């Protein structure tokens, strides 16, 4: 829900307030929000929230991919 609300409800306010949130603190992950804003600009996108781990095939696949990628960083964490 965070991403959906961020891109559909909060982002215009963040931009008006120079990327500050309602507590007047810097919006976290500004680089990602700015990139998402650019990617969605001038496009008609219907953002929908989907409950995680509810058996939706694409959602389950995304979860699997995310876990696999996170595991790669765990294995290399001693390098950093």
Image: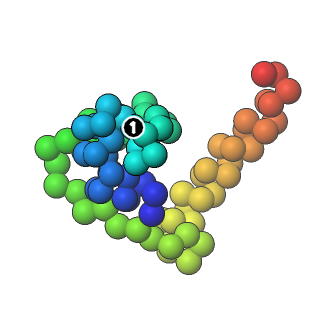
Q: Residue at the location (37% across, 59% down)?
A: 5
Residue located 41% across and 44% down the image = 21
Q: Residue furthest toward the front? A: 23
Image coordinates of residue 2 in percent, x first then y, are 46, 57
Is 63 left or right of 68, judged from the image as shown? left
Q: Residue 6 location in percent, x, y?
A: 37, 52
Quarter occupied by the N terminus: bottom left
Q: Position of residue 25 (x, y in %)?
A: 47, 38
Q: Nearer the viewer, residue 3 or 12?
A: 12
Q: Identify the residue at the far right of this view.
A: 78
Residue of label 1: 20
Q: Secondary structure at mark 1?
A: loop
Residue 72 appears in the figure? yes
**42 or 14: which is nearer to us?**
14
Decide which of 14, 55 is in the foreground and name it: 14
Give the colour scheme of this rendering: rainbow
Q: Residues within 10 Å of mark 1 (few under 14, many from 20)?
A: some
Farthest residue toward the top? 80
The answer, for residue 39, to whether it is visible in the render is no
Residue 33 image position (x, y, % from top left): 38, 39
How many badges with numbers are in the image?
A: 1
| In the depicted structure, whether residue 3 falls above or below residue 12 | below
Which of the image's four quarters has the C terminus? Answer: top right
The residue shown at (59%, 59%) is 63
Residue visible at 59% across and 72% down in the picture = 53
Q: Is residue 26 above or below residue 23?
A: above
């Amino acid at each position: 829900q965070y991403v959906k609300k961020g891109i559909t409800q909060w982002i215009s306010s963040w931009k008006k307030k120079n990327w500050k949130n309602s507590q007047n603190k810097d919006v976290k992950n500004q680089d990602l929000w700015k990139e998402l804003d650019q990617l969605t600009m001038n496009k008609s996108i219907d953002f929908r929230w989907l409950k995680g781990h509810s058996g939706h095939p694409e959602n389950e696949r995304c979860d699997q991919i995310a876990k696999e990628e996170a595991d790669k960083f765990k294995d290399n964490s001693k390098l950093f």
